[in-house]
Amino acid sequence: MGKSSVRPVRACALCGNFRELEESHIIPKFVMRHLKKTAHGEIRSIENPNAVIQDSEKHYMLCGECEDLFSKKETKFANHFFYPYQKNSVKEFDYDEDLYYLLTSISWRSLYQDILDFVQNPEQVGIDLDTLNCFIEKESEIKKYLLGKTNNVEGIENHIFFFDDIKEFSNMPKEVKPHSTFHRGETSYTFFNKTEGTLATITNMMGIVLFTLYKKGKLEVWENTQIINGIGRIEALNQIIQSVCGNELIDIMNRVKGKSDNLSEKQKEKIIKRIDDDLEGFIKSESFEAIQKDAALKKD
Ligand SMILES: [Zn+2]
């Protein structure tokens, strides 16, 4: 017997038609699936570390037709990019305009949900009207591009930063765990820095970090990170980011550190017991690999 579900009939966030909406994942769902498959134990969220999560963030957002628009490009990204990087450590990729489209669609889903939040809680988020308007304007331009009404979005940039194995990291706060944070996690959110003039969405997909810049600060340096809207090549090599966006990487690590600090005694016991019960499985897991890399980093 199939699971029954009641889908709301509302305006689709992309095409605007009133349809039965599907639950759309912000980050493509194969990322969480792969994270679970390669983990030892359960996946916990940053917001509430004492609860186990079954699935990543999703919302009734798109109609079936618009979901299909994204899903072919998602599969292509999974097979040509995500899995080769995760499973075989491939570090050079040739790409075409489908990658640009897919990356833009991921950031758009995140931006769309964040705008709803910004509009409902402007004071809590600390957002000013100019910034909010800029986000809203970009969101509507991106929508036209995703629907095929335009071939490009003026003024936005997509960048991929590979959070590769690192031996050292300048200005990194103590006690943070870069490998466990980025290789063993996923997150997506929109942020702004009024002083520097930077507006962006950041998405981590197990070490593949996507930045979509809606507005770029004057003094920013991005080297070997940009994904153009066409045919190109990207390598996980000599990538440099000098931007307030780099601070977000540190913020994410700090939040994950805070998450382990907030873990209850009961949950800690549960985790230790699971490791004790299957030590061999734990040692073979990618969770353990990341912990080891982080431990090695601290000794330097
Ligand atoms: Zn639609």
Image: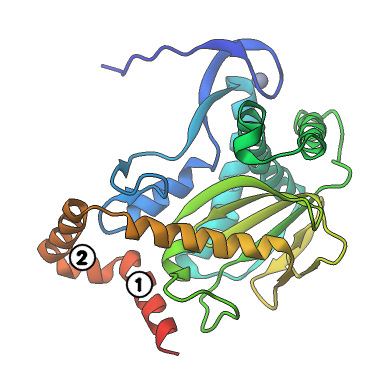
Q: Which residue carries the number 1 mark?
A: 291
Q: Quadrant of residue 234?
A: bottom right
* Rendering coords of residue 145 (x, y %): 80, 34
Residue 162 left/right relative to 89: right
Vertical placement of residue 166 versus 285, above or below: below
In the foreground, 108 or 70: 108
The quarter in which the C terminus is drawn is bottom left
The quarter in which the N terminus is drawn is top left
Q: Compute the Cα span from label 2 to label 1.
A: 14 Å
Q: Would you call the spot at circle 1 few (<14 residues within 10 Å), some (14-19), or many (20 or more)?
A: some
Q: Amino acid at mark 1?
A: Ile
Instruction: Give the numbered dot on residue 226.
Output: none
Q: Amino acid at mark 2?
A: Gly
Determine the residue positioned at 35% across, 66% down.
Answer: 286
* Rendering coords of residue 63 (x, y %): 60, 19
- Element marked by disc 2: helix
In the foreground, 112 or 17: 112
Outermost residue toward the bottom in this view = 300
> Between tags 2 and 1, which lies in front?
1
N-terminal-most mark, 2 or 1: 2
Vertical placement of residue 272 versus 198, above or below: below
Instruction: Give the numbered dot on residue 281.
Output: 2
Vertical placement of residue 31 versus 25, above or below: below
Residue 85 left/right relative to 235: left
Residue 94 left/right relative to 264: right
Determine the residue positioned at 85% across, 67% down.
Answer: 219
